[in-house]
Image: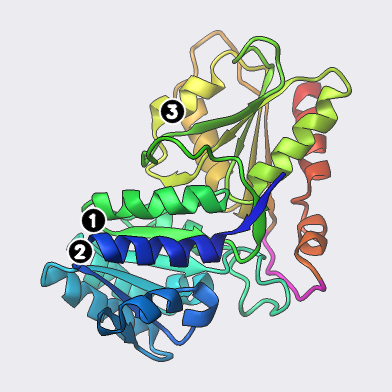
Amino acid sequence: MEKLNLRKAYGEALVAAGKANKDIVVLEADLGKSTMSAMFKDAFPDRYFEMGIAEQDMSSTAAGFALAGKIPFTGTFAVFAAGRAYDQIRCSVAIPQANVKICGSSCGLSDYGDGKTHQSVEDGNIIRAIPNMTVLNPCDAAEVTKMVSAMIRYKGPVYIRINRNDLPVFTPAEGDYQIGKIYPILDTAEKPGAAPVCIFATGVMVSQSVEAAELLKKEGITVQVVNVSTLKPLLKEEVLKYAKGRKAIVTAEEAVKTGGLGGTIASIILENAVPGEGAIPLQQVGIDDIFGTSARGYDELLEKYGLAASDVYKAVKKALHK
């Protein structure tokens, strides 16, 4: 399957958006060559602002641009976007619902060589907790391109997590991205929606879940894999549509489980359970209460932290056994 780089797709999407809309400006915190926002700088140097290693200032300045009617995109590593600039995002962006778009690049464990300080296993969970924020987590480069357009159409603050590496492409070229929609990726059952298990996956875990689904199919176990690329708002009707009639549910995310996708989906299903029908067994695939570490490659970390296709496979088997 074709693999493409999400950061490159983000940079190219910014340039395309800049050509179509002169109100778009980009602010960067000294990482433009890594986040790929430097592509925008080359195309529109008068609308690109290098803020230096000053993520707080960058976020506050972006809020000012938004008040002036511009559409600012800020860029830095996810760990700095969510951590170092938290107060400015909360007070200057989220509370006034400023039309600021925040890119948290090299999210999760994808910056595999730089260890704990640069691997953000909690950024999406942190930003999800802030009222008025929308949080997106694309599974591939094609979805990144569509998301950038959706972010521009949406009026209000949006945070997008960008993986550092090349990932398989599952998103079809046709159609626009809809914030809040859950997208079906693979169904190994003969009849769509008839599989006993649904895997709610996000980000890199979509490709890991697809691989697990193929392994399970060889054993006669059919599953449906869906892409939860909007982490917030996580719409009740979307979750229940894919959870209905299942014998088991598995969630898969490249983030700590605390405050993450798995717990949120579990609460939606529990709160909307029909009396007398019994609970649906649910297993979470995610990172335990631990930081990352340096490694020679991304796959090495996914395996170490229980995020490989084999871990999704085991979670499905365990959920069905319950």
Is 295 one of the magenta-colored residues?
Answer: yes
Q: In which quarter of the image is residue 89?
A: bottom left
Magenta segment, principal secondary structure? loop
Q: In which quarter of the image is the C terminus?
A: top right
Amino acid at circle 3: Glu
Q: Cα distance, mark 1 to mark 2? A: 6 Å
In this picture, residue 32 sits left or right of residue 170? left
Q: Mark 1 points at which residue?
A: 156
Q: Label 3, on which residue?
A: 238
Q: Which of 234 and 279 is in front in this view?
A: 234
Q: Residue at x 69, y 17 (%)?
A: 196
Q: Nearer the viewer, residue 82 or 168?
A: 168
Residue placed under numbered mark 2 in the picture: 98
Q: Distance between the residues labelled 3 and 1?
A: 22 Å
Within the image, what quadrant is residue 262 found in? Answer: top right
Q: Where is residue 44 in the image (x, y as percent from the top left)?
A: 30, 78
Residue 22: x percent and y percent? Answer: 20, 67
